[in-house]
Image (cartoon, grey):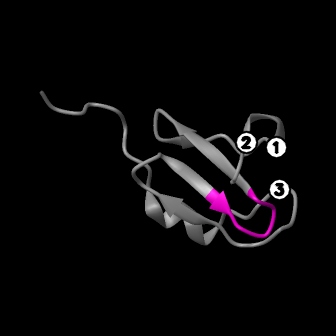
Amino acid sequence: MSDTRPEFDRRMLEALVCPQTQSGLSYDADRQELVSRSAGLAFPIRNGIPVMLVDEARELD
């Protein structure tokens, strides 16, 4: 069975920053998240589109 979800375009990482700290993000392909270590948040990627809302982010452990 193949995975048909849209893929995140990694080139977006060059333009995106954390909305809370304005720091850079890293891409977690396994979890489909953009991670802001400085804010301690992980922003979900849904259907290939990053959801850059603090209210939608998951707190890192």
> What element does badge 2 sit on?
loop
Image x and y of residue 17, in percent: 73, 64
Pointer 3 local density, CA inside 10 Å: few below 14, some 14–19, many at least 20: few
Disc 1 on helix, strand or loop? helix
Contact between marks 1 and 3 (CB within 8 A): the answer is: yes
Are dots 1 and 2 in contact, CB under 8 Å?
Answer: yes
Give the residue displayed 46% in from the left and 32% down from the top: 47
> Residue 55: horizontal and vertical position, in percent?
82, 35
Range shown magenta = 35-40
Tag on residue 57? 2
Image position of 30 (left or right of 37)? left
Locate the C terminus and report the quarter of the image it occupies.
bottom right
The amino acid type found where label 2 is placed reads Ala
Between the residue at mark 1 and the residue at mark 2, the CA separation in whole angstroms equals 5 Å
Q: Which residue lies furthest to the left in this view?
A: 1
User: Which callout, 3 or 2, points at the residue further toward the start of the chain?
Assistant: 3
* Residue holding disc 1: 54
Real-space CA distance between mark 1 and mark 3, rounded to the nearest whole angstrom: 7 Å
Placement of 5 over or under 50, stated as above or below: above
The image quarter in which residue 16 lies: bottom right
Going from N to C along the chain, the mark reached first, 1 or 3, is: 3
Amino acid type of the residue that numbered disc 1 sits on in the rendered structure: Val
